Image: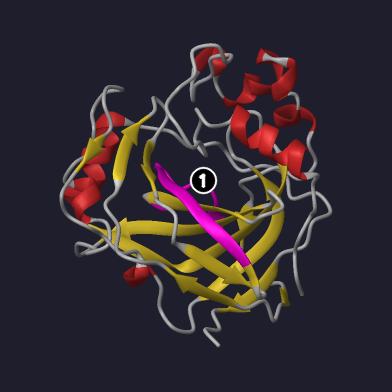
Amino acid sequence: MKLKLVLGKALLIAAALSVLTVGTPYMAADSSKTEWSYEGATGPEHWGDLSPEYAKCSTGLNQSPVPLMNQGKKTDSKMTFHYEAFVPTIVNNGHTIQVDVPEGNYALIDGEKYNLLQFHFHTPSEHTYNGKLLEMEIHLVHQNEQGNLAVIGMFIKEGSANKSLDLIFNNLPASQEEPVTTDEKITLNSLFHKKSKFITYDGSLTTPPCTEGVTWYVFDKPVKLTRTQIDAFKDIFPNNSRPVQPLNDRLLYKGTLKTH
């Protein structure tokens, strides 16, 4: 099974550019965009009313995140990850900590190349798993040549330090100033484990404008961070998570990571 909702390249790129300032963004905040937040009058329950371009946040039927559970039809979807060591650019965009990734890092999903553009974090987790929220969630945003988006989601829980993320959490920018760069490199390969299980479904961006046509692959095995690292993120963003949305008529599909 291959989940792909094909949007016109121009439409999806335009939609992506309009969210470059949000929880699934590619660059720093654009002051010309309608302001939104995770609480109060500009919080998630009001996003669809803040601007016509955010209407999907209220009217969309394929919104993310959704409640996930350990059941569903099986999929033979295959993924391989081709991540090289790189120097990260760490950005506080006002909604999350985002790490911009240079060219050369990509995933092959059912034989199609999706370039990794950036990854970012939410607390608590946006998806639930078997009815429960976890401490945090990481979203790795990929895009193919046609402009279609595929997001790899991974839960985060308290435990030992993760060598792929140590450098990020040791250099969290507390304010929206200059991006943080270091002389050290990181690699994301240790985030994945052979035969890891995932759930895939058709969804949306989890932040305004809540564009639909995004294919999600959420892994069930959490990544671990130390209590200190989790608390350091929460000191900056105590809550930057959209509540779960109705699944409606969508199906969840279960798969196992197949590296060949």
User: Extreme right residue here?
Assistant: 249
User: Which residue occupies 77% across, 75% down?
Assistant: 1
| Residue 65 x/y as whole percent | 61, 46
Q: Quadrant of the C terminus?
A: bottom right
Q: Quadrant of residue 171?
A: top left
Which element is circle 1 on? loop
Task: Give yes or no for residue 72 being in the magenta stretch.
Answer: no
Task: Give yes or no for residue 117 being in the magenta stretch.
Answer: yes
Q: Which amino acid lies under the numbered mark 1 shown in the image of this protein?
A: Glu
Q: Quadrant of residue 50?
A: top right
User: Which residue occupies 64% across, 45% down?
Assistant: 64
- The residue carrying pointer 1 sits among few (fewer than 14), some (14 to 19) or many (20 or more) residues within 10 Å by Cα, namely many
Using the rendered image of the protein, determine whether residue 129 is visible from the camera's viewpoint: no
User: Quick one: 68 or 113, which is closer to the camera?
Assistant: 113
Drawn side of residue 121 relative to residue 10, left or right? left
User: Quick one: 85 or 52, which is closer to the camera?
Assistant: 85
User: Quick one: 72 or 219, which is closer to the camera?
Assistant: 219
Magenta segment: 113-134
Residue hosting label 1? 126
| Residue 165 x/y as whole percent | 26, 56
Drawn side of residue 48 relative to residue 87, left or right? right
The answer to whether 141 is drawn above or below residue 186 in the figure is: above
The answer to whether 205 is drawn above or below residue 132 in the figure is: above
User: Which residue occupies 61% across, 66% down?
Assistant: 113
